[in-house]
Image: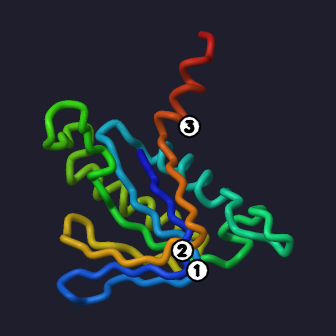
Amino acid sequence: MRFLIQRVSEAKVTVDDEVIGEIGDGFCVLIGIAETDTEEIADVLIKKMTGLRIFQDENDKTNLNIDTVGGNLLLISQFTLYADCRKGNRPSFVKAGSPEHANRLYEYIIKRCSEHFPNVQRGSFGAYMKISLVNDGPFTVMLDSDELIKPKAAGKKN
């Protein structure tokens, strides 16, 4: 699972010329889901994302998390985060999860985030979307479950 997190001062997603999700200060998060991803993996990435201290405190230090600043979330499914560009010029998306699996986990992520944040907006799974945002900083962070979770498991002794 991959979360591409952009700290924004505003962001919106449009489908067929209609704004379907819009936020002020917070995170615009593009979410890529692989076939091997699970709810447990989603929970780890959600916890990491919401704990990231990438908002400025009164001394201009990045010391505050999204909860502390009362930030908003715009969550957008983005299978192209699993593009494999190693061969040729046409990306392969074979590592992306099937639409059914990815949509189920995307909905799970929205539900879990909505339990803790009053303003969680969303894109439209599978739709052609236009995303507009003002990246604040700019500040962009990639969370990848392969880097966050699997190395820990590989280092364990049986």
The reply to whether the C-beta atoms of the residues labelled 1 and 3 are less than 8 Å apart is no
Give residue 49's position: percent from left, percent from top.
58, 56
User: Could you tell me the amino acid type at mark 3?
Assistant: Leu
Q: Residue at x 53, y 49 (%)?
A: 45
- Marks 1 and 3, the one that precedes in the sequence: 1
* Coordinates of residue 76 in the picture (x, y in percent): 36, 66
Label 2 or label 3, whichever comes before in sequence order: 2
The circle drawn on residue 148 is: 3
Answer yes or no: do the residues labelled 2 and 1 have beta carbons within 8 Å? yes
Q: Is residue 44 left or right of residue 3?
A: right
Query: Which of the 4 image quadrants contains residue 94?
Result: top left
Kindly report which numbered mark, 1 or 3, lies closer to the viewer in this rendering: 1
Which residue is at the front of the view, 114 or 152? 152
Residue located 45% across and 48% down the image: 39
Quadrant of the rendered image containing residue 46: bottom right
* SS label for mark 3: helix
**For the point 17% across and 84% down, which residue is it?**
16
Report, in whole angstroms, how far the alpha carbon at label 2 lies from the one at label 3.
24 Å
Q: Position of residue 31 (x, y in %)?
A: 39, 56
Farthest-out residue, bottom: 18
Q: Is residue 156 left or right of residue 147?
A: right
**Element carrying mark 1:** loop
Quadrant (top left/top right/bottom left/bottom right) for the N terminus: top left
Q: Does residue 126 appear left or right of residue 104 in this picture?
A: left
Can the viewer see residue 114 in this picture? no
**Neighbourhood count class around disc 1 (C-alpha, 10 Å): few under 14, some 14–19, many 20 upward:** some
| Residue tagged 2 | 8
For label 1, the residue is 25
Look at the image and tell me in which quarter the C terminus lies.
top right
The image's colouring method is: rainbow
Amino acid type for the residue under numbered disc 1: Asp
